[in-house]
Image: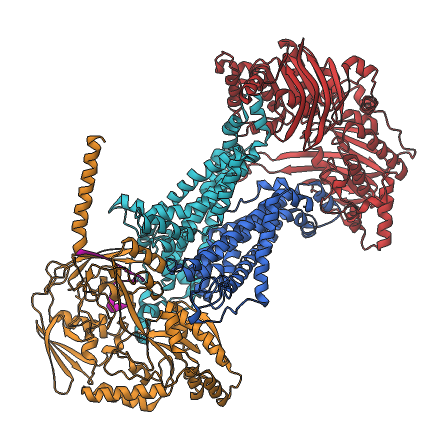
Chain colours: A red, B blue, C cyan, D orange
Amino acid sequence: MALVEIDDLTIAFSGRPAVAGLTLRIDRGDRYGIIGESGSGKSLTALAIAGLLPDSSTVAGAVRFDGAPLPEDERVLARLRGKRIGMVFQEPMTALNPLMTIGEQIEEAIVLSEVPDVANLVVPDLLDEVGLSPSHVGRYPHQLSGGQRQRAMIAMALASRPELMIADEPTSALDVITQRVVLDLIAEICKRRQMTLLFISHDIRAVATLCSRVGVMQAGRMVEQGAVADVLKSPQAAYTQKLLAASRMDRRPAPVASVEEQDLLAVMGVSRVYAQGGLWPWRDPPLRAVDRVDLTIGAGECVALVGPSGCGKTTLARMIVGLDSASEGRMLLDGVPYRGRDLPPGSRAAMSLVFQDPFSSFDPRMSVGTSLAEPLHLLGVMSREERDARLREAVEAVGLDASMLTRYPHEFSGGQRQRLAIARALVTRPRVVVLDEPVSALDVSLRGDVLNLLARLRAEHGLSYLIISHDLDMVAAMADRVLVMEAGRIVEEGRPDELFARPQHSLTQALMLARLPDVA
Amino acid sequence: MNWQALRHNPSLLIGLVATLAFALLGVVSIWWTPYPIEQVAIAQRFQGPSPAHWLGTDHLGRDMLSLIMSGTLTSFVVAALGVLIGVAVGVPMGLAAGAWGGAVEWLVLRISDLTFAFPAVIVAILITALAGPGETNAIIAIGVFNVPVFARVARGGALAVATQDYVAAARLAGHGNVSIAWRHLLPNIMSLLIVQGTIQLSLGILAEAGLSYIGLGTQPPATSLGLMLRDAQSLFLIHPWLSVVPGLTIVFIVIALNLAGDGLRDAMDPRLRHQGLAHGAG
Amino acid sequence: MGVPCPMTLYLLRRFAGFVVTMFVAALVIFFLLDLLPGDPARFILGINATPEAVAALRAQMGLDAPVHQRFIQWVLDMVRGDFGLSHTQGLPVAQLIAERMAVTLPLSIFAMIVSVAVGLPVGILAAMRRGKATDTALMILVQIGVAIPNFWFGMLLTLLFSVTLHWLPTGGFVPWHEDPVAALRSLILPGLALALPQASILARVMRTALVDVTEQDFIRTARAKGLTKAEAVWRHGVRNAMLPILTILGLQFAYLIAGTIIVENVFYLPGLGRLIFTAISERDLVLVGGATIVLVLATTVTMLIVDLCYALVDPRLRGRGA
Amino acid sequence: MHPRKSLTLALAGLMLATASALAQPTEIRIGVALEPPALDPTAGAAEAIDVVVYQNIFEGLVRIDQTGAVQPGLAESWTISQDGLTYTFTLHEGVTFHDGTSFDAEDVKFTFDRLLAEGSVNAQKALYEPISDVTVVDPTTVEFTLSRPDGLFLFNLGRGDAVIVAPESADNNGAEPIGTGPFAFVQWDRGSRVVLEQFGPYWGDKPALTKATYLFIGDTATMTNALLAGDVDGTNNFAPEALAVFEGNPQFKVLVGSTEGETILSTNNAKAPFDNLLVRQAMAHALDRQEVIDGATYGYGVPIGTHFAPHHPYYLDLTSTYPHDVEKAKALLAEAGYPDGFSATLKLPPVAYARLSGQIIASQFAEAGIELELINMEWAQWLEDVFANKDFDLTIISHVEPFDIGIYANPDYYFGYDNAEVQSLNDQLNATTDEAERLALAQQIQTIITQDAVNGYLFELAQTGVWNGKLDGMWQNAPVEGVVLRDIHWVE
């Protein structure tokens, strides 16, 4: 029997449809996954089921919950939501009221659900169910980690013993290991409570792990739906096929040029220490964000640095590129010693950085050409012709047209921007490029292209890469050598195939375990 | 911001048009007013509106329309220069705080605390005692009041911008703090500053009126809207018109500026609504 | 994180900043006053006084000591609570300031209460009815409220309530100990005149803050829990929207304490602002200096209190220590 | 209506009725524009002090009456020696100060010794400089010896600067004045009001009022409202521009009287081009006195052509010496070597008549080719710049001292007029007590200074009081500064 039925749903904003002609049916006990990229309308669909669409939207079509259309009266609708639907959102930090304790917020949900239990008996039970301890009752959201916050969100959603749980990208703000734990928790609870699940994600593998049925959305339309096994095995829609292809990370061909013997970059005993304790610095030991790290990158080599969030890999990368200075130790770039910010301009030209987020890495008030030309400043005075030639070379290398240089960042898509970011990294003809999560902010379908581009550039220009990432599959596809980092130290090192086949260190093992299985 | 935004935002349109109209009225008075405003003609005083004097004449027989034109100019100029001082001093302070952080930021915050701790009227009184009354006082007093406002707005904006990757990219490209502040921070907080500037301009007009009203601002034979109110105040029961005209002019100008400011904020960047008016208390 | 009591650290840091600000303020005030043209002694004695009489009075007022010596003495005395004797009135400055504070402080508090009592509900109502006729009407009123000069508004109030209706006095002030009711009555009109623009600003900020908060994720969470939009905004939104309001309240209160001079003139109230105003025209520098320091102190303390309130209201600050 | 409620209402009505019945006839609230900085008239020049205390709290040996004549005060009678150098006063008996201490000749001696002492801070010390000795003959007799005859001596004794103070209380008079007058000081709410109450043991006739409150209202509009709302019962000097509100209103009485304030366009005679008689004459012709009077005083000022009060018997009407004539002014300027006119500054103190006159005069002078830059100043700065340092071209000020033509004989005075003839005439005037001779001398001086166009003579400041229609006994004129409560009373 259908718990949720959506019939020809269209959601439009000022005349432009964001969801068009969507029909969907979720049976009781189903675990239904919706896959789609950003802007595909998948979250709006979820909100429509709960009657939470923004006031500015115009809605056509029918949404029926348990056979009845959603109530017109706002109060009745709200109470229905409270009693029968539980919701978990993507960003647990902003989804929780920062001024109320976790206990108060869960209790409110219990009161609203009108379940005749005594609240203070239930709150600890709920916390226990999601794997939090009773001591968390009095904590404020900011005092919890991301995973704990998401657990609290789930506890809140469970308070009313809902028939339907809607989870909108519940794990995409979490790190790999936590992500897996939360997914497992949701799966387990659904099984135990016989709860219907609507799971929304851009990650095809997460959906495959969790769901029994799947719908694929693209640009507001449902392009394909069916049982997970069927869809993944024999995708019908071209878009689904593309998504599936993109989720497979094949080993990019190693560069033709062999790795030279000499180290291009050497990091020697580098630490970054932050004083703690403010007025009484002696009371607390300093925090060693990076702790005596040694590493080398040979010319033409691709080295990956993996680790959970907060392990110090970004701090290390910032010191290597010269955005921050080491407290101890030093580095050598092509024989030039430096501690970080003191990296001389000439050497800076030999190294560049590609940022994670293509949206914030370009100044919106500057034409792309101006932004791209910024690093040329490092090479001293340059004639206009030479400058233009350099820019054209860089832009064409990433497969874009030089005529685009006069445009502004907002005129480009995310994938194009990341290409431009790579072009900027190449404009000084560097030897080392540091890539900080180069594809994780991109839609899945674009990731493959960008990785291919990176592999090609490496081969053509003999570049060395240092990739910072938590994505083991991507690392396995790109890197010659992998370093695993935990709490500021490098705990394991090796070739990716060997390392991932036989992880030694507990962290590497945990990372491997958290890895979602490949689809198909 | 473009014409499209203007069409969808009637209050912005009204605000901008009205502000420009008043500003134009003031600017015209530099070259031309119906009658010279210094020209006293006691025999002609307290005339109601007539074809010769559209808004009548004041207690010295001067043409009210000419006075309103000239007064509007003074009020605008005083408020604008006050805002300019605030921008010229406050924005570099805020940018420096955002770009350098640490001790510089601490210093900037302390300086802005300090300037904020001196209320505008007190500053005006002290300056008046020091240098005699006049527009300059009002300008400096309003300027001093604006310095911490712009310092804080610029710092807030700069801190938000400074976390963006493009700033790190500029650092990698070898740009120092000054260059980053100039190339990246300033252009990106510009809309914030324009919106805040509009709001401060309207507050400046009110402040000028208040200061002139207690005799600390504009001095005759020049005039300003506040001074006209002051001159007319004791005659309110006999010749209410003399007070109503400049009073309503102030009200209209301030409303126009506020509408323009709100409209600009909505049109430029919805995110700005967080910061706007945060310093509107004065 | 690390420090046992981040609150203490925060308080200490904040307090240190406060002391520095006050010291620099004292320095600025003193040297500014020292630069003032006009001889206090000559002012007191008027145009026909003999030079000997003027010199005698200068010596009597202690104006002949070196500058730095007078500054150090002044600061030390103030730290001990001794603000000196007024040149013109021969009374302790502390007493004169205290007398004026008995007007300015209640007036500011009254205006504050009115502006909160009017501004916040108007802002909340407008935010809840966002885009509807009520919102538009309220926001038009608020625009006018912001735009009317408060002294002009005060004048109009007097014309209506005092001259025409005879309900309230036109101004003046009856001391509290004499007749508290009359004292309160004499603060009503000036309080309203002061409160109008403040209430309007507050209403605007409240509306904006609430509209912003309404778009936050946790409001959606609250609705998902089963609250209607209005309930969610009321239970979760208002408290969060109060954070920016707190800053505005602090600024407004600081402004009210200092900025009442103009309205004090309209209602001839014996407030602190007018004290400074007359004292400086009489070149009673001891009094000006003391009163200005007190005003600066009031502003700075208000901001300090706001920051502390922030730390109390917002658990994020409590936990992190600023 | 509930019986209880109606009872309450009735009671309230009764209370109101009694309150008004009691309050109306013997109490008064007077609005005054300026608050005195302190209340000791012997240690400050501010007119505001005298407004509150003169003849109310403090009394002198003699007092000035409404006409400016000298009347017995604490001295019931006096004799003057033939040579005019010895004055012997007989004091009233049974006079006490408000603090209960008694008044006798010793207090008189103390008062003048203090006034004339080395470190004295009396603003008008110079006026009493002819006194060489004060001797106590017996407790009710005191003898003054002068170093030279002084025709104004008795008048000066009647001024606020020469009121009698007691050694016990003199030092505190600024904050808590203790005098012998019909009203005793009760309290001073600074910034707001001073309250006086009738002094029971007063030695003379009891005044009609039992209580007087002075309210300090600086703003004309506010004063207007306070008068209209009945918050104050009257004010001694109301801004002329708003008088129209009260004229013709039967509830109010508008009293227009004279003061001793000769308002002049003070000219720095020591400075070029004003040291040139032709320039000064040109300025006198450029001036349209009537327009200034109409514009600045709304017609209430009385035109003067010289530095003398028009109501004084010695006054000479010289207003037509230099009639308004722009062409003549231009011609004179050309003759003086300024065919294109010149520019000068006009420094204005913070009083309405000066600021308004300044604007009007600037406009008039502009027609004759003289560009005036208006510089508005505070009192303190004006006193320093103009008065003490003589750093000015022109200024507008009212000289409120009675009979102060002697300032033209002082070459060090701020306007820098140095004329030996005037100086010698003034010495003769000071030395003689013969009325006819004095009249002739005074008029001679008036003529000379007018001919010399030393200053621009504008108008005699009017005193424009507004009072409740049921009040009577207020001084219409102000021969000395002060609001004398003695005769004020309510009438039905």
Instruction: Find the magenta span and give its range.
Output: D26-44
Q: Residue at x 85, y 43 (%)?
A: A394
Is residue B2 visible to the viewer in this orientation of the structure?
no
Q: Is residue D42 magenta?
A: yes
Q: Is residue B22 magenta?
A: no
Task: Give the image location of residue C41, x and y in percent.
Answer: 34, 68
* The image quarter in which residue D322 lies: bottom left
Q: Is residue B67 left or right of residue A460?
A: left
Task: Give the image location of residue C16, x and y in percent.
Answer: 48, 46
- Count of numbered marks: 0
**Nearer to us in this view, B64 or C217:** B64
In the displayed structure, would residue B256 be above or below residue A65?
Answer: below
In the displayed structure, would residue C91 be above or below residue A517?
Answer: below
* The image quarter in which residue B271 lies: top right
Q: Is residue C312 left or right of residue D165?
A: right
Task: Give the image location of residue C49, x and y in percent.
Answer: 30, 74
* The image quarter in which residue A399 lies: top right
In the displayed structure, would residue C66 be above or below residue C189?
Answer: below
Question: Which residue is the extreme one toward the front?
Answer: B51
Q: Residue at x 59, y 21 (%)?
A: A153
Question: Which residue is the extreme one toward the right?
Answer: A256
Task: Give the image location of residue C52, x and y in percent.
Answer: 31, 75
**Nearer to us in this view, C127 or C305:** C127
**Nearer to us in this view, C304 or C48:** C48
Is residue D125 visible to the viewer in this orientation of the structure?
yes
